[in-house]
């Protein structure tokens, strides 16, 4: 990351007093415009732990949660009647738009025939064909979340290699899989700060390296303890970090040389194009994982093994003692998931859809960059296919440590809420914006204009 001369009087180029003023104005405006929401929350939220159905709903930078009444295409409507251009899209879960027509039709049809019965359908067979056509030659399994899929993939990796550890990258995102919850502190792997109820010593089952640092990867692999490298093609958990030239080829070569499996988690980077970053850029993982949007928003994840890995696992499974494998959940691979997978893979996740997304996202990237330059902000913009982020620091970023330093929570939260007040919703956990097949040019231009207005306030 490029360094600016230190200036303790500024936060991401903004005077702290001005930042506080804009933040308070944004909070006041949000609260004043949502009386129905506040009234509904005054009693309804009391039945939930800490007032929300899922704890991360409190991570949105709003004074109180927005209550959504409807979502269609790339728009959300809240209880007070505000219509927002949605660039969060369920943090990738609805990347192809809310309730795509083929998926909604498939849900209605399958609902008449049953929701779950622990047996496959003809749609399951078709889904397998489509998964291979879209993502490559893998032997597939279905899960409900990418966290589950990653957990199962790691069990397979440990089974076929006989090794205990997974190697992940500092600042990585792999859902809430326990063994990825490590970070680097003074160059040493340690459990992430803030974990709830953590009792296992994660350093016994995980190791952590810096993204784009092949030397550190090789040092860990050389111990002979690493069963698998688990990585995203692009780091997306904090501020987006792109792979440097040769990094993925290096990972593949090192994994092969040291007998570890390479797991590619495309849960976020499926935005890259048809088949995900892996297909677009010709990567060759041993195990492929994706979740969130693969079934059009129906909770579904996929994980697949290359034929040689599948064969090695089946040999292991035939030889192991009888008993529970520790893999699988009752509602996974249900007929509704397969109906939605087929609808998405066959009719929603198409070349024309990605072409539209790429075009609109490129327009968004260019517009945000123009605004940043016009205001002289020490920020930059990164894009991976349909996924765009503005980062409140100079770039480019090289690894998770760079990304952590670039993260500016006060600025990001203020910008997010100020955009909401101007009718634009972006992801709450970082400055991520997604463009869907339903996103219109006018929505992109409104977001660029709103971003310009927010920076005008912040840098006034």
Image: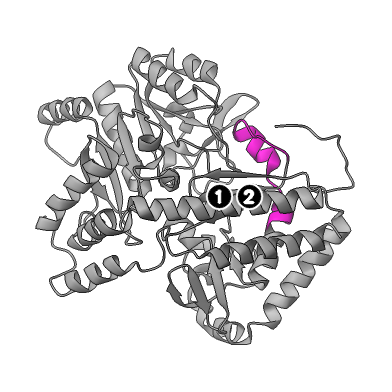
Q: Residue 286: x, y in percent?
A: 30, 28
Q: Label 2 belongs to which residue? A: 366
Q: Is residue 310 left or right of residue 70?
A: left
How far, Cα to Cα, is label 1 from label 2?
Answer: 6 Å
Please rate how many residues cluster around mark 1, counting C-alpha atoms within 10 Å: few if below 14, some from 14 to 19, many from 20.
Answer: some
**Label 2 element class:** helix
Q: Label 1 belongs to which residue? A: 362
> In the depicted view, which residue is nearer to us: 379 or 183?
379
Quadrant of residue 150 within the rendered picture: top left
Q: Residue 193: x, y in percent?
A: 59, 42
Q: Residue 316: x, y in percent?
A: 16, 27
Q: Residue at the location (87% across, 54% down)? A: 15
Q: Is residue 446 left or right of residue 200?
A: right
In this view, 455 is above or below 43: above
Q: Is residue 334 magenta?
A: no
In this view, 432 is above or below 242: below
Contact, CB < 8 Å: mark 1 with mark 2? yes
Range shown magenta: 394-412
Q: Residue 436: x, y in percent?
A: 45, 59
């Amino acid at each position: 990351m490029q360094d600016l001369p230190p200036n303790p009087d500024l936060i991401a180029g903004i005077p702290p007093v001005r930042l506080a003023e804009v933040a308070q104005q944004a909070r006041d405006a949000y609260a004043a415009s949502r009386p129905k929401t506040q009234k509904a929350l005054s009693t309804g939220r009391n039945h939930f732990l800490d007032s929300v159905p899922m704890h991360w709903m409190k991570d949105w930078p709003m004074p109180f949660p927005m209550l959504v009444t409807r979502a269609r295409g790339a728009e959300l409507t809240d209880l007070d009647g505000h219509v927002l251009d949605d660039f969060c899209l369920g943090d990738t879960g609805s990347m192809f738009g809310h309730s795509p027509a083929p998926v909604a039709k498939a849900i209605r049809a399958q609902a008449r025939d049953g929701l779950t019965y622990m047996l496959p359908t003809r749609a399951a067979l078709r889904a397998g064909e489509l998964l291979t056509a879209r993502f490559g030659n893998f032997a597939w399994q279905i899960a409900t979340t990418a966290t589950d899929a990653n957990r199962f993939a790691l069990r397979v990796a440990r089974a076929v290699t006989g090794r205990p550890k997974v190697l992940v990258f500092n600042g990585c995102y792999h859902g809430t899989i326990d063994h990825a919850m490590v970070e680097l502190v003074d160059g040493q792997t340690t459990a992430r700060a803030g974990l709830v109820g953590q009792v296992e010593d994660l350093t016994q089952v995980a190791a952590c390296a810096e993204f784009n640092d092949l030397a550190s990867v090789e040092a860990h692999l050389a111990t002979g303890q690493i069963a698998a490298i688990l990585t995203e093609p692009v780091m997306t958990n904090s501020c987006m970090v792109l792979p440097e030239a040769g990094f993925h080829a290096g990972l593949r070569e090192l994994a092969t040389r040291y007998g570890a499996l390479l797991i590619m988690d495309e849960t976020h980077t499926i935005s890259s194009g048809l088949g995900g970053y892996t297909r677009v850029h010709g990567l060759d993982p041993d195990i492929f994982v994706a979740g969130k949007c693969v079934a059009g928003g129906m909770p579904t994840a996929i994980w697949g093994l290359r034929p040689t890995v599948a064969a090695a696992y089946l040999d292991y499974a035939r030889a192991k003692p009888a008993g529970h494998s520790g893999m699988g959940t009752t509602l996974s691979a249900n007929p509704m998931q397969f109906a939605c997978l087929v609808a998405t893979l066959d009719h929603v996740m198409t070349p024309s859809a990605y072409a539209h997304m790429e075009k609109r996202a490129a327009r968004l990237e260019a517009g945000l960059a123009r605004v940043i330059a016009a205001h002289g902000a020490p920020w930059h913009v990164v894009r991976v296919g349909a996924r765009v982020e503005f980062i409140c620091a100079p770039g480019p970023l090289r690894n998770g440590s760079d990304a952590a330093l670039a993260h500016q929570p006060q600025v990001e939260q203020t910008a997010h809420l100020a955009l909401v007040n101007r009718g634009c919703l972006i992801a709450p956990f970082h400055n991520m914006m997604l463009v869907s097949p339903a996103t219109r040019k006018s929505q992109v231009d409104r977001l660029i204009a709103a971003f310009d207005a927010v920076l005008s306030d912040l840098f006034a």
